[in-house]
Structure formats: structure tokens, C-alpha cells
Image: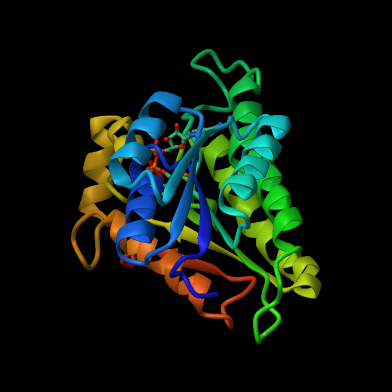
Amino acid sequence: MRMRDAVVLISGAASGLGWGAAQYCVREAGARVVMLDRNAEQGAARAAELDPGRCLFVQADLADEAQVAGAVQRAVEHFGSLHACFSFAGVVSPMRMLDRDGKASSGATFARTVAINLVGTFHLLSHCAQQMQRNPPDDDGERGVLVTIASGAAFDGQVGQTAYASSKAGLVGLCLPAARELAGIGIRINTIAPGAFWTPMLESLPETVLERIQADFQFPRRFGRAEEIAALCCHIAENHFINGECIRLDGAFRLPPR
Ligand SMILES: NC(=O)c1ccc[n+]([C@@H]2O[C@H](COP(=O)([O-])OP(=O)(O)OC[C@H]3O[C@@H](n4cnc5c(N)ncnc54)[C@H](O)[C@@H]3O)[C@@H](O)[C@H]2O)c1
């Protein structure tokens, strides 16, 4: 798939890495972008700031399938087709299995996190694939590309990350069977497992956790930059032979236990 003039739906595009990807896709790759987020105020403002001619903001909560279906439909009505989906939307929800008194967690945080990060992403991928299968195939038979954003926590989850790590490990597990299923209609799917990138999500973590993370940086000894993950998304979209894969993007960083 060529990124220039392609229509790319980016979820979580109102903030952090998704917003960085939206800027990169429009400014560096020359794509047209559908910015999906549940935060309408920030998302609409950023779409207008970026390029109203090449950007459309659509509000949707990933956990609500009807909203996701409507957003994908709007994207196709607006730009005429959909070629790629980079799904960044997600939440980090610290939780423990047992509370301070040793009582079992209610599981509400766990269920909500999985409903957004895993089930919500699944809805988005399915509705995008439903549209992409109508695209005319290119010379290689390709009709679309999906990229999900997991996390290093899928492999090295910390204490307090049972919900988050489970949801992200689910995305890693989803990737290969989805690639195998969608191969028949020329749609590829890959996932990226980022290390630590400085965004509002990371800013929400306790100072002690951030200090431990920084102490474990390898090379480069810094947080990742949004344009580094955006560039990888675009490369995946353009390189037909990357399929069914989970790529760690972390400068050899591994999350410590706590
Ligand atoms: N920042 C990091 O170091 C890091 C590391 C590993 C993985 N990730 C993953 O990268 C993705 C982006 O993270 P970020 O750091 O940019 O976070 P962020 O909090 O800055 O941005 C997340 C965006 O997703 C949106 N969102 C959340 N829940 C939603 C829902 N139910 N429906 C629609 N939109 C929703 C938010 O409104 C926000 O705009 C997440 O999936 C996160 O788990 C981030």
C-alpha cells in the first residue's frame, strides 16, 4: 500500500501517540486521515489544526460497537474508501487482584480495560476489514492494512498491570489468526509493542514508577518519540511482506517487575 493519498483511520488520535501518528501521516506521508477518539473536544480541535482538507474527526467510544461501526461508515462516506487502520486508542488502568485487606478485586476495572483495549480494538478491526474487502486489489492482491498497538506489558507486565497486560497480550494473540483469516481477502495485520514513550498516558503514572522505568533504559537512553512509532506504522503499511507479526519498538527496554 502506498501511504500517499491513502485513507488511514487512526484511533486514539486526539492525544499522545495517535495524535503523533496523525500528524506524521498527513505531513510526512501525504495520507488522508480519519481521527477517531472519544474525546470530541480535543480531537476536533486537533483535526482542524492539522489540515481540515485532509483530516476528518469522528467521535466514538471503542467499547461501543455501534459507535465504532458508525465512525467507520462516516469515514468511508467522507473519503470514499479506507485503506489502513492504525489503532492506538487505549487506557492504562492500574489494579491489584487483591486489595490491602486481601479481598478479591471486583473485576470491574479488569473488565472495562479489556472491553476497551481488546474487545473495542477487535470491533474496530472487524468494521475496517468489512470496508477494506471492497477495495480493488493492488498488483499483489492487497486491499488493506491493519496495525494494532499492544505494549511491552504484553510480555513483561508489572505488578498492578494484570488488566492492562492481559488486554495487550490479547492483541498479540489476535494478530496471527487474524492475519491468516484476512489473507484470503488481501488484508494484512500486524501489531507493535511499544516500550516507554512520553505521552499523557505515561504522565499519569506515579513518579516512583517513572523513575524505575528511566533507570532501565538501554539505548537510546530516553523515552521513545511519537514519530518513531508513526514511521513504523507507515513502513508496515508500505511493506507487503510484514504480516501476522508483533514488532517490539522499545530500544531493548524491558519493564521491571514494579
Ligand atoms: N505511552 C507509552 O509509553 C505506551 C507504551 C506502550 C503502549 N502504549 C499504547 O499506545 C496507545 C496510545 O497511548 P498514549 O500514550 O498515546 O495514550 P494517551 O492517553 O495519550 O492517548 C490515548 C487516546 O485514546 C483515547 N481513548 C481512550 N479510550 C478510548 C475509547 N474507549 N474510545 C475511543 N478513544 C479512546 C483517549 O481519549 C486518548 O486520546 C495505547 O493503546 C497505549 O496502551 C503506550
207 sits to left or right of 250: left
Q: Residue furthest top?
A: 101
- Could one spot residue 121 in this view of the protein? no
Q: Nearer the viewer, residue 192 or 164?
A: 192
Residue at position x 69%, y 47% in the image: 122
Residue at position x 70%, y 43% in the image: 123
User: Which quadrant would the C terminus be assigned to in this image?
Assistant: top left
Q: Whole-percent x and y of residue 169?
A: 60, 52
Q: Nearer the viewer, residue 43 or 183?
A: 43
Quarter, ligand 1: top left
Q: Nearer the viewer, residue 227 or 219?
A: 227
Q: Is the image coloured rainbow, by chain, by secondary structure, or in one colour?
A: rainbow
220 sits to left or right of 125: left
Q: Whole-percent x and y of residue 216?
A: 26, 55
The correct choice, above or below, for 60 with respect to 83 in the image is above
The correct choice, above or below, for 247 with respect to 148 in the image is below
Q: Whole-percent x and y of residue 99?
A: 53, 18
User: Which quadrant would the N terminus be assigned to in this image?
Assistant: bottom right
